């Protein structure tokens, strides 16, 4: 009887360690993925960010799947990056007058 209790306790401990370890790995994978996405968005040019904002605005509310949640996180990162960047001053050359 003592060996059954010991075996059950060891199995429960092993299951708990596996459960916690799996949760830790899942959390680390999600954090790493989010960091890679943030780095990719940060590396985008101002024009790329503007195009991404336009694509995000064009997307209508879809079904709440994992792909839609990833798209929402991407759009949020793009909007945050766009807000954090200072505005750029563009020097424009005036067209030469047409010869007459």
Image (tube, rainbow, N blue to C red):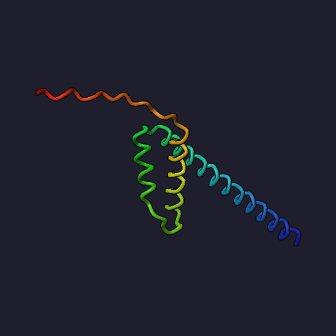
Q: Is residue 32 above or below residue 21?
A: above
The image position of residue 13, as x and y in percent, is 78, 61
Name the one closer to the observer, 100 or 4: 100
Q: How many callouts does the rendering have?
A: 0
Left or right of 88 in this view: 84: right
Identified at 48% across, 35% down, the residue is: 87
Name the one closer to the observer, 94 or 13: 94
For the N terminus, the image quarter is bottom right
Residue furthest front as drawn? 100
Left or right of 75 in this view: 93: left
Residue furthest right as drawn? 2
Identified at 55% across, 39% down, the residue is: 84
Residue furthest bottom as drawn? 1
Identified at 50% across, 46% down, the residue is: 78
The image position of residue 82, as x and y in percent, is 50, 42
The image position of residue 39, as x and y in percent, is 52, 40
For the C terminus, the image quarter is top left
Q: Is residue 21 above or below residue 40?
A: below
Name the one closer to the observer, 40 or 11: 40
Residue furthest left as drawn? 100
Q: Quadrant of residue 8?
A: bottom right
Identified at 44% across, 60% down, the residue is: 59
Name the one closer to the observer, 27 or 76: 76
């Amino acid at each position: 009887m003592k060996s059954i209790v010991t075996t059950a306790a060891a199995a429960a401990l092993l299951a708990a360690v596996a459960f916690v370890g799996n949760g830790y790995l899942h959390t680390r994978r999600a954090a790493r993925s989010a960091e890679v996405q943030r780095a990719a968005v940060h590396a985008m040019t101002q024009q790329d960010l503007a195009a991404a904002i336009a694509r995000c605005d064009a997307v209508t509310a879809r079904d709440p799947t994992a792909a839609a949640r990833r798209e929402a996180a991407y759009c949020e990162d793009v909007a945050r990056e766009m807000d954090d960047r200072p505005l750029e001053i563009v020097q424009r050359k005036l067209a030469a007058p047409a010869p007459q």
